[in-house]
Image (spheres, grey):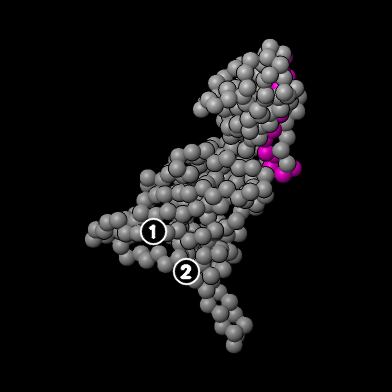
Amino acid sequence: MRKFAIGAAVSGVLALSALAVPSASAATPDLTFSNVVVNNGKAIVVGTTSTVKAPITYTLTHPADLVIDNKTNIAGIALYRGSSLSKMQNEMESDDIPSCTTASTTATTVTNSCTEVIAIEPQDYLYSASDARTWKVAGFYGRGTSTTDDSGDHLSFEYGYGMWGGLGTTQVKRAAKLTTDATPGPVKKGQTLTVKGALTRADWETTKYSGYTGQPVVLQFKAKNATAYKTVKPVTSAAKGALTTTVKASADGSFRYRFAGTATTGAATATGDYVDVR
């Protein structure tokens, strides 16, 4: 279920230890993660196929005698959902090594400014509508060493793993799509136009988009040569996300539907449909 980044970064040793987290064979060092910003403070909106890259910046303070080499050990940020770390229901981390630079030092500590990117592939990380919600932010540390004695056909490894929660939250939302189709066209001035469309959103279980019913959408119009759209009227999506309303044709221009989004679904704006009024 989890793409365990440490397993890729620590020579394969912690890929085995990941099966046993969060328990560990030895104590982990005292680390402090702070100033965590996920996806520039914006919601992470994910569709059904495309990978979404969420940048993360943070400050990491660790003991001065600890060297994080990203080979035998690593530290970074994880996103998870669940009531607590011990009861997490889903989690995602970066598959790449964080980039850190030293910001300050003391006799006992080193403080780094770090960046990393979590590449979210919907089919690997998001499994159902329940994943569209508030996710929590945690810091993690993992280390692993191994020895192989081919003469005695012996393999051993030692690992440690720790997580620190309470670092903030971020929203993960389902991507939405909107369409607009104004007919007839061309049309005489004063004639009734029917503007149809559909509001759909990502379904991570089927990897398709499905209708989003009962949602408020606004119909907007931009006159020819105008620079901005203006709201004409509100419309509510019907069965399978269908949208339909009527307006009187008054001037050349484009109609479009716009959806502001919800707590679980991202905003969407349809491409404008131009109508020639004669």
Q: Which residue is mark 2?
A: 71
Is the residue marked by circle 1 packed among few (<14), some (14-19), or many (20+) residues within 10 Å?
Answer: some
Which comes before the other along the chain, label 2 or label 1? Answer: 2
Please tell me whether mark 1 sits on a helix, a strand or a loop: strand
Number of disc labels = 2
Give left or right: position of 214 versus 27.
Answer: right
Residue 254 horizontal/vertical position (percent)? 62, 26
For residue 231, what is the image quadrant? top right
Report if the CB atoms under discs 2 and 1 are less than 8 Å apart: no
Work out whether residue 209 or residue 187 is closer to the camera in this orientation and state it. Answer: 187
- The quadrant in which the C terminus is found is top right
Residue plotted at (45% across, 49% down): 56
Please tell me whether mark 2 sits on a helix, a strand or a loop: loop
Q: Is residue 253 magenta?
A: no
Magenta-tinted stretch = 192-207
Q: Is residue 196 magenta?
A: yes
Give left or right: position of 56 versus 102.
Answer: right
For residue 260, what is the image quadrant? top right
Q: Is residue 223 above or below residue 40?
A: above
Query: For the residues carrying marks 2 and 1, which lies nearer the camera in this image?
Result: 1
Main SS class of the magenta portion in the image: strand
Work out whether residue 129 or residue 267 is closer to the camera in this orientation and state it. Answer: 267
Work out whether residue 40 or residue 10 is closer to the camera in this orientation and state it. Answer: 40
Which kind of residue does numbered mark 2 sit on? Answer: Lys
Any mark on residue 100, and which? 1
